[in-house]
Every structure is written in structure tokens, then in C-alpha cells.
Image (spheres, rainbow, N blue to C red):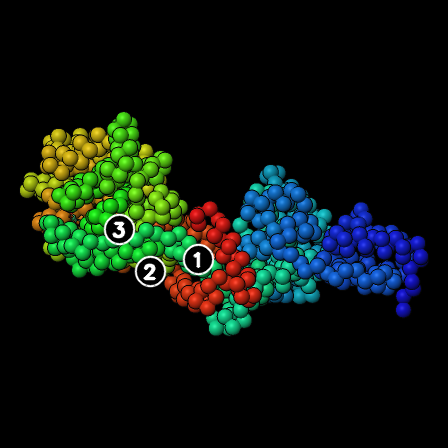
Amino acid sequence: MTADPEPALARKARRLLEAEAAAGFDDSSTTGGLSRWVAGQGDGVGSLARLSQYSRLRPRTREDLARAVLADLGAPAAPPARARDVGAPVTVLPGVGPTAQKRLAALDIRTVGDLLYHRPRRYIDHSSVVPIAEAEPGREVTVIGDVVEIRARPSRSGRVRVVEAAIADETGQILAVWFNQVYLAKTLRGRRNVAFAGRVESAAYDRQLTSPEYELDVHRMVHAGRLVPVYPLTRGLSQRQLRRWMALAVDDYANDVPESLSAAHRRAHGLPDIATAIRNLHFPVDAVAQEAAARRLAFEELLVYQLAILRRRQTWRESQPGRPVKIHRDALTAFGGQLPFKLTDGQRVAVVDILNDLRRDRPMSRLLQGDVGSGKTVVAAGALHAIVGDGWQGAIMAPTEVLAEQHTATLRDLLTPLGVRVELVTGSVPAGEKRRLWREVERGDVHVVVGTQAIIQRSARFARLNLAVVDEQHRFGVQQRGEIRAKGYNPHLLAMSATPIPRTLALTVYGDLDVSVLRELPRGRQRIKTSFVPAHRRGDAYAFIRKQVADGRQAFIVFPIIEESDSLNARAATAEHKRLTRGAFADLADDVGLLHGRMGAAAKERAMRSFRDGQIKILVSTSVIEVGIDVPNATVMLIEGAERFGLAQLHQLRGRVGRGDHPSYCLLMSETTDATENARLRTLQTVYDGFTLAERDLELRGPGDVIGTRQSGALGFRFATVTDLDTIQSARSDAEALVRSDPGLVQSEHKPLAAAVAQLLERNEWN
Ligand code: ADP
Ligand code: MG
């Protein structure tokens, strides 16, 4: 039985502990901390001696201790512990001050919850703890021993300071060496029972651990003796710091992270509860537990994402009624009747789907997917014809001016005979004329407006916009999809994509859209014979082009550099044009044209027209033609630097030839000798299905190629991978079931999910 403290000390202790309780047991009640205070009070402390460990404890344990001591001192019971709030700022963690707070904010970590969801980039396996005698060179190990000797000295070159320590346990001794970390000599001098983790090397006289991690508290291994997390960092933040704070956060807050999956749900999918998952995300007991944690967090993320998609779709459909279109019975017949060809089955089904959507009083949200050349424009024309027939206006938005111009031409061919007025409004239309056109649009005299983003960026007014078509949808973000929608009074939306979207991505990126697919190409379309040509055989490729040109055909030579840089693309194409007209095709110099995105609209137009009309035989171009022009006499597509591109994109490019009756060819030039890379390109020799190629891209190169880097980044997944079809599908079906049983997610067990969904929907990209 320990003695009571002296009354004066008891009073003081009580005041300090009450201050601790008010401040959240952060050891701030007295300068230097409570442990130091107790130690400084001499013999009279009696039972207060228990507080001598206080400063070393974690807040939760401090709380227990403080309450016990207060009770002994006869203080009335303090109010019950606050439920710990993971929404609290990181500064509630001991050791995290304003500077650390700022640095963490750079990682988007503001609250303890943010911290707990900060995903380790990887783990170092320091879990093999061995006696020093068994630390064999070449192995990653953790040893636990005493620091029997430690010193700092300059290196032989004098440029760095070396700290050397001898570590011993009962089986042997090993050397540890650090560079430029002189403070370690002080931190570690005379320490016993310290864990050191690293790769064992054989040094001149001894085995050696170079710059090992160390862990002073072997009862609570954070930096050694386990799978050790490695986090993304930011300036001024070290792994050790972050790991230490993470350990505090996990210990004290993991149990308070809201659980969003019901026990039944978790059982059905074999997923751990959230507290276990958070613990094993950061400090996994083993690799299996770590994987289970990752799986659970990915599933949860996808479930929330799918719920948000369903919610947004519901909002679009229900809270903002669309305006139904009366479809005149003979509209489709009239449209089909004047086409120069028969619609494919796929086209007919797509048109019917669309017309059925348009009839409803909720706005259509449909994605029309189809390989390049599958005839999507015709389908869009059918839809535009139908709405114009009921007195509405339509708009079609294309990613490039060249394409907008071509659409204008196509739509005029198809629709002008039916009395539909189609006008092009792009940046290159003279200002005066543009103003006049917009006035006519506002009056309703123009039926269909074709343009680039410009048509959503300016404060354009339509008299009766009721169908917005977005071509090459994958080039636009979710945001723009929303913007064009906002142009009319919630018009029907038809998105079109020539990049076949694998099902996984369709469910995430386009999960809010209904999908129509054109699987077949119009009859008579031929296969483009594709060959892989290593760079050293470029001469053969040129000879082939020459022969085709001699036979009266035409060729593309394409330099698809990088999507993001128009100017780099332009420069490469320009340089190549010069090189070719002075070299390999010097004798044909007048027949070699140039086309790139940086050219003025008139010059572009000229180049395109002269190629289409056969005045130019060889068109050197950037990938602007990927979504561009239709020239039936072109039979060769030579693609330079093919290794830099996704298969689906190359597939789209080659779709520019083979549009006439002549056999057509695609030559893929590769600069690399990397066998895997070139094997990837050879896929195009045998695979002609855009969907399969897109799936392959997704496997090999990730989602950037398929949906654009911007969009895949905008998904903002931390744990989920867009290629994980199984998880995505099960999250989707669970989300659908949840929404069926509890549409508003109002049941109490769905509250955390509802909150997570609301939070996601608040993010900008979602509006
Ligand atoms: P994409 O789906 O790549 O946008 P387009 O709409 O540009 O394809 O159509 C490609 C070409 O196929 C155009 O020249 C178009 O006139 C033609 N086309 C479209 N549908 C058919 C069809 N059913 N039969 C024959 N040719 C067609
Ligand atoms: Mg198209």
C-alpha cells in the first residue's frame, strides 16, 4: 500500500490532472510534462509516483491512469470520455504541432481520419526477427540487442560523418553504420534492447547493417520487427515521424472510424471490419491481413462510388424532368429512306433505343460506343433528325475543329435534304458571322449547332435545345458532360465514344449512362493489313508507300507524339515533313502535305481538302487525324513512334484507311528494341476488335490510355483499381441492391455510407 501524497501535492496534482482532462490528456498541463513534474517532487509523492510514466503513455492510456489517480485523490468523477472524433484535426495527436499540421495538409491530411486513410505506398518486410548469430549476409532481418559501443567519426574522404555502433545480443555481435546522422550517436548511446532492421552485408571484419531502421520500444514495434509501412511523404516530413504519428492514431482512433459495411455484408464478402482493416493497413500482422485490409478498403471505396453514381443518375432522371420528344412515325423511315446505304443492325437498334429514350419525360443519358468506322455519326444524325422534327434544337460537340467541320459536312449531307439547318460555330468562324449565327440559334432558326467546347463555354442561348450530342466522349471530362447539360433545360444527352470502353471502366466512368454498342462495322469494310516494322527497315516502308502512290493511292504518315502537347506534336510533324520532302520523297515533294493542330483553320482545311481531292498524295500529320477525315482513296497508314501509344489509339488511327475498295495497310514503326513492347504492338497484326484491344491496354498500361489521364485521375481512387473487374462488379450489384432496399440510405445502419456518398458527391468533379 503506497502512502497518500502530501496534501499540498495532492491538490496540485488534482489541478494538473483536471487540466489534462480538459486538454485531452496531451501532457500539456505543466511545462516539461507530468512525468518530469512528479520526478521533481521528491519523497512526498506517495501514490502519485504512478504518474511517473504518464508522459510516455498514449492519450488513451493516460486517460485511464489520470482517472484512477483522480479517483484516489477523491475528485468527483470527470465527465465520461468523449467518443474520439476521427474528424478532429491532426494536432490532437501528441507531437503534431502547427508545422507538422501544415506539412500534413500538403498530403491532404487534415483530420485524424484523413491520416488513417493515408495509404502506405508499400511495406518493407522487417518481420524476420533473428538472433544476431543468424543474421546472414543478404537477408533482410531485424535483430534486437544492446548498443555496446557507438561513435561518430569523419569518413575517410572527410565529406560525410559516419556513426558506427556495435550491437550485441547473447549470440553475437554485429556492426551498424549510418551516414550524416550524427545525432544517432546520442539517441542510441548506452541503449539496451533496441531493434535494428535492414539488409545484412558482409563487411571487412564483420557483418554489417547499413543505415538500419531502429526501434527503441521493442514492445510496440513500429519501425522494425514487422511489415513496416512506407508512406508517400512531402517536404519536411520523415518516414519515422509519419509512422510514429500513424501508430498513435491507429492505437487511439482505429476503433472510432465509422463502420460503413454491415456485419452481414462483411461476412458475405469475407471482409474484415473497419478497425481491423485500418490497423492492418498500417501495421499489418502479416501479408494476408494486409491484403484483406486492402481488399476491404477497395471494396468500400467502390461501393461508395457506385452509390454516388446511382444517386447522381437518379437525380438527373427524377429531380429534373426532361422534355419528351414526340417522334413522328414516319421520321425514321424518311431518314433511312434517303441514306446512301442501309443501316447496320447495330445502328438500327441504337437509333430505336435512342428514340425510346427521347420519348420519355426524363432526360436520356446514353453512351453510344462503337469502334472507329462503325457509323456513330449516322446514328446521331437520326436522333437529331427526330428531335428537329418535333420542333427542338440539337447540338453536337466535337473535341477538335477538324472533326466539327467534318461533322458539319456529314450532317448537312444527311439532313439538309430533310429540311434541317446545320451550322458550324467554332473558334475559327469570323466573329461577326458567329454573332449572327448565335442570334439565329437564339431565335430558333438554326436547328443543329456543331462546334467544339466553344459551344458550351460562351454564354450561348438556344431557343429550344433538347438534345446534346458529345462526340469522342472520352476526350471530355464528367464535368463537361454536366456543363453541356446545363445549356438547355436539362436536354437529352447522347455521348459517343470511338474508344471502346472495357466493361470495368464503363461501370465506373460511365456508370451513370445507359449504353448502346455498335459491334459490327458496315458491310464491305475491309480488314487493314497491319505490319510491324522495326525502325531500321524504315526504307522498306517508304518504298511500299511509293509503290502505292505510283498505283494512284494515297498515304498517311502519322506522328502521334503526346496527347497533351500540341506544340511538340506540331514541331515533330513539321520537321518530319521537311526531312521527307528533302530526302526520301524529294522527287514527290509537291505531293507531300502537312497537317497539324497548330495550323490555322484555313490552312488545315486546305491541307485536308487537297488530300481528300487527291492533289496531295502523302499527308504527314499528327494524331489530329485520329478522329478526323474520311478519304476512301487512302490505303496506307504509317505510324511513327507507335510504341508510345495505346493499342486502342493505334487501332483508331488505322481506321482512317480501308474506307474505300482498295486493300489497305497499316505500318507500325517502332523505335524501341524492347521485346515486350514490340510484342505488344504485334497484337495489332492479329487483333481487330477495338474492345479486346482496349482491355489489353488496360492490363498493360492502365486506364490513362483508355479514358485519358485526366479522367482516370479524377476518379480519385485511393484503394481501388479500375482494372479489378470482380470487385467493381460486386460493388455495383451491392450498390444496386442497397438502393432498391433503402433508396435514400436513411436506415441507421446505412448512415455512414450515406455520409461517405454525400462527401463524394460534394467533390467538384461530380457536379
Ligand atoms: P464513326 O463511328 O467512327 O464515327 P462514322 O460515323 O464516321 O464512323 O462512319 C464511318 C463511315 O461509314 C462514314 O463514311 C459513313 O458514311 C459510313 N457508314 C456509316 N454507316 C454505314 C452503313 N450502314 N453502311 C455503309 N456505310 C456506312
Ligand atoms: Mg466519329
Q: Is mark 2 within 8 Å of ligand 1?
A: no
Tell me if 392 is positioned left or right of 250 in this view.
left
Read off the residue under disc 2.
503
Kind of element beneath mark 2: helix
Is any part of residue 433 visible from this angle? yes
Read off the residue under disc 3.
498
Q: Is mark 3 within 8 Å of ligand 1?
A: yes
Q: How far apart are labels 1 and 2 at the CA level?
A: 20 Å
Q: Quadrant of the N terminus?
A: bottom right
Q: Earlier in the sequence, mark 3 or mark 2?
A: 3
- Name the disc covering residue 311, or none: 1
| Mark 3 nearby-residue class (10 Å; few <14, some 14–19, many ≥20) | many
Task: Place residue 404 in its image quadrant.
Answer: top left
Q: Earlier in the sequence, mark 1 or mark 2?
A: 1
Residue in the image at 75% along x and 51% along y: 23
Residue 367, compared with residue 97, is above or below; it is below
Residue 705 position within the rendered picture, expressed as x and y whole percent measured from the top left: 34, 50
Amino acid type indicated by mark 3:
Ala
